[in-house]
């Protein structure tokens, strides 16, 4: 597959994409907008009356983000007023889920999945992807819930979907960057992405960021139910599985900012485990020891 060129996507094209998104249709009376954790796709089947009007779903994975989630949703609304929003909350002790319940009660375009506990970022993202497929969305845009992914970059990422199946909000594309990162974190991030490019031969600079927009139809082709990663390496594995399924990958520059409130969840042990997982996948793929199209 030919690699997508890396270029900055003009802001005004992103605005045009947002303007083409139809206004969301409220859920019919009696249809819950606060579903609980689910076991299968059939549990999420949407009412046919609303599925046709849905295009963009913005997803947020939360655990103890009570100080960030409400102002973040307000900021998203300023940039993408017609998007629907799904929050996947892992039973946050600080009451994040209750805050989103309150917002959802007043706004039928906000939805929440309550999970029984802290089950990991990878499984939370898979839950959001399953929800997007079951409810007939065309695009799913995932972002962190702590303002490290500023909503002002949404238009550029969405503009990239004109030519790509996945557009990554990239720290390492021309014009991208990070804000006040320690040198050690930047070195590790750069090293991981260099390793991913070497082993997986994907035409992107930033394979580890979660700020991404997916074409939902491509997710159906990637067999993500076979994903083995549950931690940080999930981002690389899901991108690779989409890549070998034929996804066209693109990048739009962002500035990764520090979280505005709350405690960072960066875990050194999990980071090392994820690097080991990437090495395992990478070596197997590089030497042709595994066929991920069958796994």
Image (tube, rainbow, N blue to C red):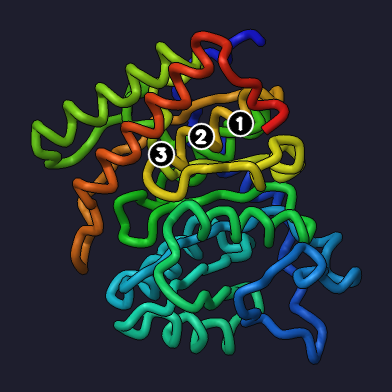
Percent from the top left, x then y, of residue 12? Answer: 53, 36
Left or right: residue 77 compared with residue 175: right
Residues at circles 1 and 3 in contact by the CB criterion of under 8 Å: no
- Residue 19 vs residue 136, the one in the foreground: 136
Spot occupied by residue 271 in the image (x, y as percentages of width and height): 27, 42
Q: Residues within 10 Å of mark 3 (few under 14, many from 20)?
A: many
Please give the name of the residue rendered at 43% of the width and 36% of the height, measured from the top-left corner. Answer: 169
Q: Identify the residue at horizontal 25%, vertical 24% (top origin).
A: 190
Sequence order check, earlier mark of 1 and 3 = 3
**Left or right: 92 as drawn, with respect to 80:** left
Residue occupied by mark 1: 241
User: Is 290 rendered above or below residue 237?
Assistant: above
Q: What secondary structure is marked by label 1?
A: helix
Residue 262 - label? none
Q: Residue furthest right?
A: 48
On screen, residue 240 above or below 33: above
- Residue 237's tag is 2
Determine the CA span between mark 1 and mark 3. Answer: 12 Å
**Residue sticking out furthest to the left:** 183
The answer to whether the residue labelled 1 contacts the one labelled 2, judged by CB atoms less than 8 Å apart, is: yes
Give the quadrant of residue 248. top right
Task: Say if mark 3 contacts mark 2, CB within 8 Å.
Answer: yes
At 37% across and 44% down in the image, what residue appears? 232
């Amino acid at each position: 597959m030919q690699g997508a060129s890396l270029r900055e996507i003009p802001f005004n094209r992103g605005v045009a994409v947002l303007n083409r998104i139809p206004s969301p249709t409220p859920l019919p009376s009696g249809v819950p907008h606060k579903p609980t954790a689910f076991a299968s796709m059939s549990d999420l089947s949407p009412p046919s009356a609303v599925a046709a009007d849905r295009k963009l779903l913005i997803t947020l994975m939360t655990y103890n983000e009570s100080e960030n989630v409400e102002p973040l949703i307000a900021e998203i609304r300023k940039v993408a007023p017609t998007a629907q929003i799904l929050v996947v909350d892992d039973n946050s002790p600080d009451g994040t889920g209750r805050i989103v319940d309150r917002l959802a009660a007043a706004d039928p375009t906000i939805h929440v999945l309550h999970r029984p506990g802290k089950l990991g970022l990878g499984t939370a993202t898979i839950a959001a992807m399953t929800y997007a497929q079951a409810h007939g969305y065309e695009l799913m845009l995932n972002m962190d819930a702590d303002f490290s992914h500023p909503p002002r970059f949404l238009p550029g990422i969405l503009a990239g979907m004109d030519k790509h199946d996945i557009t990554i909000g990239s720290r390492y594309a021309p014009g991208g960057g990070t804000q006040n990162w320690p040198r050690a974190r930047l070195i590790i991030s750069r090293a991981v992405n260099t390793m991913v490019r070497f082993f997986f031969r994907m035409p992107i600079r930033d394979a580890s960021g979660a700020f991404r927009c997916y074409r939902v139809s491509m997710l159906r082709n990637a067999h993500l139910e076979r994903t083995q990663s549950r931690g940080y390496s999930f981002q690389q594995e899901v991108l690779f599985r989409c890549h070998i399924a034929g996804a066209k990958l693109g990048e739009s520059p962002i500035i990764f900012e520090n979280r505005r409130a709350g405690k960072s969840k960066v875990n050194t042990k999990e980071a090392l485990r994820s690097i080991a997982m990437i090495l395992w996948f990478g070596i197997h793929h590089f030497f042709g020891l595994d066929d991920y199209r069958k796994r």
